[in-house]
């Protein structure tokens, strides 16, 4: 059976991505990162998703973003900003973590090389996203070209393909794909604030809720707060 | 004053590289990595070099290569192989660490972005080297193209240049450059084995000794063993 390393944050997109890898016929090696994120609650979700997708292995690497800083997503000195849908994507938000996907994919390369993996999956999305530079197609293309020369595996003639099944899908299309693949959405965690319930106010919550709203599928996650425009299954959640 | 992040292992090449950055007019932000390397002795050397070059800051990041494996340089289960000069570069040796420079440069990108750095220096060398794929010009070129799209700094029109002053120099030329820049070679550490004295038998020791021999300059480092062809200052060291 072919092997794929799948970057798994515990969020909705990476969960659908891991199930897509499984559906594509790969044995899944899930790779998550503990990096001082305020929402490290997502790592519990990552473990649950790894189990649900039948991952062969799930590795959680500790990486020192907290020693570097530069993001409202790390540490507790700065709060995550409340958002409205209109403002998302206008400029790169403070939740941007410098070089995060570059670092995550680099560890994916290393882990993939050791496992002799045939593919490296990452659930980036360039349609309904927060405007991070390292979620764009040109970033993925550049990383693919780097991967083609960076490792022994590549020099030996087997550069690892970077696979991005969600790159050009809308959030609602990602959710519809997740339904078809039987992704247990209730086990995923998207909120940047990381309390016991999702906040329903950060850009990650809003993008997620908008996706469920557009897909006409109620979000099974629990929220502290729901925006006015979200109308699905409110009675059940409040 | 302009700022440069300088990757600093504590070895000879990265020391010359940091002094070159200083000579180029940059304030040096030194960045080292603790990654389970058997020769973590080199980190003491990195600290000494950071002091010697007058670095504004020296950060040592802990990165989890030990959780990934795949190299004789990490952990103690496998010894580093003794080498002869003739065999070096023939094939990628077991001391190769999967995706190491990709990961190190990625952290350099992150740190550089947070510091608003104007350049990222790395002392890779593609002439007298161990044959690692991530020391070659094509790797550096690909990483440069990645850096041009990966960060907020790049999107804002200021992609960080990757500077490689040693890339096409021979080891003896690197040593001569180091002499001109007053690099304290006695404070550097190159040996992969990491005892109290350098082993004089691993490929890193042999490449270093060959460089000093070719430059006609005695290596001030202490060795357990010196190869027959090394003739400089033997009496002092034995």
Image: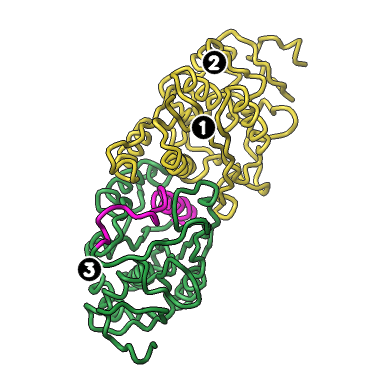
Chain colours: A yellow, B green
The span picked out in magenta is: B87-116
Q: Does the magenta stretch include residue B93?
A: yes
Please tell me how crowded label 3 is: few (under 14), some (14-19), or many (20+) other residues with Cα within 10 Å: some
Residue B218 placement (x, y as % from top left): 30, 85
Label 1, on which residue? Answer: A29
Task: For mark 3, give the secondary structure.
Answer: loop
Same chain for marks 2 and 3? no
Label 2, on which residue? Answer: A178
* 2 or 1: tag closer to the N-terminus: 1
Q: Quadrant of residue A135?
A: top left
Q: Residue at x 47, y 57 (%)?
A: B78
User: In front: mark 3 or mark 1?
Assistant: 1
Q: Residue furthest bottom?
A: B235
The numbered mark at residue B170 is: 3
The subunit letter for the residue under badge 3 reads B
Residue A44 placement (x, y as % from top left): 67, 33
Horizontal side of residue A126 vs A205, given as left or right: left
Which residue is more in the foreground, A67 or A87?
A67
Q: Considering the image in quadrants, where does the N terminus of chain A appear? A: top left
Q: Is residue B224 above or below residue A66?
A: below
């Amino acid at each position: 059976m072919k092997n794929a390393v799948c970057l798994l944050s515990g969020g909705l997109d990476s969960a659908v991505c891991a199930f897509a890898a499984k559906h594509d016929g790969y044995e899944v090696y899930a790779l998550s990162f503990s990096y001082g994120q305020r929402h490290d609650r997502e790592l519990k979700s990552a473990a649950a998703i790894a189990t649900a997708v039948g991952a062969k292995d799930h590795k959680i690497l500790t990486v020192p973003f907290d020693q570097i800083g530069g993001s409202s997503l790390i540490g507790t000195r700065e709060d995550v900003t409340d958002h409205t849908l209109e403002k998302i994507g206008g400029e790169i938000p403070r939740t941007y973590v410098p070089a995060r996907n570059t670092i995550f994919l680099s560890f994916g390369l290393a882990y993939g090389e050791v496992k002799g993996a045939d593919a490296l999956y990452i659930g980036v999305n360039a349609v309904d996203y927060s405007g991070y530079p390292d979620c764009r197609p040109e970033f993925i293309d550049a990383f693919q070209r780097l991967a083609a020369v960076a490792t022994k595996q590549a020099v030996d003639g087997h550069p690892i393909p970077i696979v991005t099944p969600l790159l050009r899908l809308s959030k609602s299309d990602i959710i519809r794909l997740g339904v078809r693949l039987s992704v247990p959405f209730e086990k995923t965690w998207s909120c940047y604030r990381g309390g016991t319930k999702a906040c329903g106010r950060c850009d990650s919550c809003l993008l997620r809720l908008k996706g469920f709203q557009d897909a006409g599928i109620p979000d099974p996650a629990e929220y502290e707060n729901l925006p006015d425009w979200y109308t699905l299954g409110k009675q059940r959640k409040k």
